[in-house]
Image: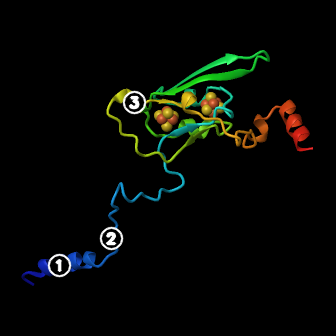
Amino acid sequence: MFGKGIFKGLKITIGHLFEKKVTQQYPEERPVLPARFKGSFDLNVAKCIACGLCSNACPNHVIKIESVKDENNKKKLTGYKMLAEQCLYCGFCVEVCPTKALQWNHDYERAKFFRDEVNLDLYAKYTPSPDDDKKDIPEKNVKPEEKQDESAKAS
Ligand code: SF4
Ligand code: SF4
């Protein structure tokens, strides 16, 4: 039939007129983000064992770690920088972290005027908190002496 296409198009347009509006008035309205949204990174320095797995897993050489050995020959983190402008958001670094020290956060407002400002110094950014215990470390990564300390604290 001649002109059938117009009616088809109008049907779709009119249908959209009565749909629920999805536009958000950002920045007055803030989006509700899914739990696994990849914004920026947080590092819990207290949980980091300076193993370097995150840095080795990164395909784009984004992560630079500095560490020293303490009197017990145990590595101690002294610096953690990310060239975030090169990050692919692949998530390998977060996945591979054995202590869950490195996590994604929901910081999506990462636009900066200068490129250097995009990069992250997670060691300097870290603020110690009372929740910084090592309870989240999987059993296989807790040394026997640390387990004893925990049980002594509990009793
Ligand atoms: S998300 Fe991927 S590219 Fe970005 S720092 Fe982690 S491993 Fe590297
Ligand atoms: S993988 Fe985790 S524990 Fe190891 S250096 Fe990276 S952030 Fe620290």
Specify whether 78 is left or right of 138.
left
Residue drawn at x 89%, y 35% as measured from the top left:
148
**126 and 140: which one is in front?**
126
Q: Mark 3 points at which residue?
A: 117
Instruction: Kindly report the distance in space between the C-alpha atoms of the residues bearing marks 1 and 3.
Output: 49 Å
Helix, strand or loop at disc 1?
helix
Q: Where residue 113 sits: x, y (%)?
A: 32, 33
Other-residue count near label 3 (Cα within 10 Å), few / some / many at <14 / 14–19 / ≥20:
few
What's the amino acid at mark 3? Glu
Identify which residue, 99 or 1, lies in the foreground. 99
**Residue at disc 2, secondary structure:** loop
Going by the image, does 148 lie left or right of 49? right
Q: In this view, does 125 lie above or below 9?
A: above
Task: Kindly identify the residue that appears in the image at 42 percent across and 58 percent down.
Answer: 31
Of the two numbered discs 2 and 1 in the rendering, the one whose residue sits closer to the viewer: 2
Quadrant housing the C terminus: top right
Q: Residue beneath label 2, please?
A: 21
The residue shown at (32%, 64%) is: 23
Query: Please, is residue 139 above or below residue 124 in the view?
Result: below
1 or 3: tag closer to the N-terminus:
1
Q: Distance between the residues labelled 2 and 3?
A: 36 Å
Give the SS element for disc 3. Answer: helix
Q: Do the residues labelled 2 and 3 touch (CB within 8 Å)?
A: no
Residue at x-position 36% and y-position 39%:
111
Q: How is the image coloured?
A: rainbow
- Rendered image quadrant of residue 132: top right
For disc 1, the marked residue is 10
Residue at the limit of the structure toward the right, as seen here: 155
Which is in the foreground here, disc 2 or disc 3?
A: 3
Residue 10 x %, y %: 17, 78
Q: Where is residue 59 in the image (x, y as percent from the top left)?
A: 48, 30
